[in-house]
Image (tube, rainbow, N blue to C red):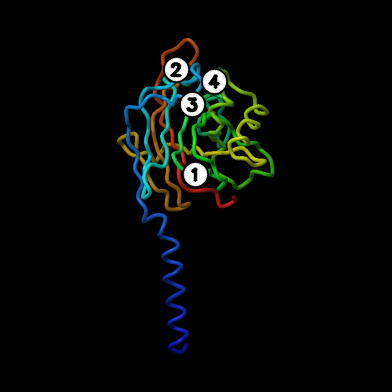
């Protein structure tokens, strides 16, 4: 290999190294802040949320703010299916709300406009169109706050239709939930997953079974990063 070829090969190596590490080199953090749920939410929805928010910030400032329900209703028939991390929740259940101060991208790299959205739990369908998207089937789907005005669970058809209004495409806006076995000791917390280059926030949601008291459930939500299938 002559000198020119060696120089070119070195440039390619360092370019690849930079591309592989640039996202990881960025730093993100999550903190709890006292902030009432946004006025953009319907009153019946807003009243179910905590008065504190999870604020995620990165190199460019605030990425998003998330409000969780004071008590998320548990499923009457918990799921134990393979690949389901949060089987104690039912499809269509309202879990929280999120505000983006600037445009963001979801787990499928769909562009999401700044604004306030609800977050509802959903399971990835078991079909050939979704194989390899994620090892887990659990997601939170975005819906525009102005269009999602009830705390009642939504059926899949209505939820997908609302979420497509958030993405502006033919696919709902999906945000991947992952198992919380890698959660840091102190919550809320955030961690980088090197294997798939994802930033995950970990937090505790209060899940309430029918007729029982709420109990904390650790959850992990991908807030920066996307599926390689996108």
> Which residue is under mark 2?
47
Q: Dot 3 lies on which element?
A: loop
Residue at 42% across, 53% down: 194
> Which residue is under mark 1?
104
Q: Percent from the top left, x then y, of residue 59?
A: 36, 50
Q: Percent from the top left, x then y, of residue 123?
A: 59, 33
Alpha carbons under labels 4 and 1: distance apart: 31 Å
Marks 3/4 in contact by CB < 8 Å: the verdict is no
Alpha carbons under labels 3 and 4: distance apart: 28 Å
Task: Tell me the crowding category of disc 4: few under 14, some 14 to 19, or many 20 or more residues within 10 angstroms, Cα based.
Answer: some
Mark whose residue sits in front, 3 or 2: 3
First along the sequence among labels 3 and 4? 3
> Which residue is under mark 3?
40
In-front residue for pair 110/156: 110
Residue at 46% across, 32% down: 98
Q: Percent from the top left, x then y, of residue 18?
A: 41, 65
In screen coordinates, is 130 left or right of 76? right
Mark whose residue sits in front, 3 or 4: 3
> Which residue is under mark 4?
75
């Amino acid at each position: 290999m002559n000198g020119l070829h060696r120089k070119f090969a070195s440039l390619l190596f360092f370019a690849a190294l930079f591309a592989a590490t640039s996202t990881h080199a960025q730093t993100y953090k999550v903190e709890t802040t006292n902030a009432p749920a946004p006025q953009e939410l319907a009153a019946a929805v807003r009243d179910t949320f905590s008065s504190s928010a999870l604020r995620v910030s990165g190199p460019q400032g605030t990425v998003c703010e998330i409000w969780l329900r004071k008590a998320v209703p548990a499923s009457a028939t918990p799921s134990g299916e393979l690949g389901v991390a949060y089987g104690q929740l039912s499809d269509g259940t309202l879990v929280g709300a999120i505000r983006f101060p600037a445009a963001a991208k979801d787990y499928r790299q769909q562009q999401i406009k700044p604004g306030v959205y609800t977050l509802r739990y959903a399971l990835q369908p078991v079909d050939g169109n979704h194989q390899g998207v994620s090892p887990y089937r659990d997601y939170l789907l975005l819906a525009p706050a102005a269009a999602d005005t009830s705390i009642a669970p939504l059926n899949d058809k209505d939820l997908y239709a609302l979420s497509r209004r958030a993405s502006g495409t033919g696919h709902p806006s999906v945000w991947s939930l992952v198992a919380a076995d890698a959660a840091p000791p102190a919550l809320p917390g955030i961690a980088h997953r090197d294997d798939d280059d994802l930033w995950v926030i970990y937090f505790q949601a209060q899940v309430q079974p029918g007729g029982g008291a709420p109990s904390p459930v650790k959850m992990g939500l991908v807030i920066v990063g996307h599926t390689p299938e996108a």
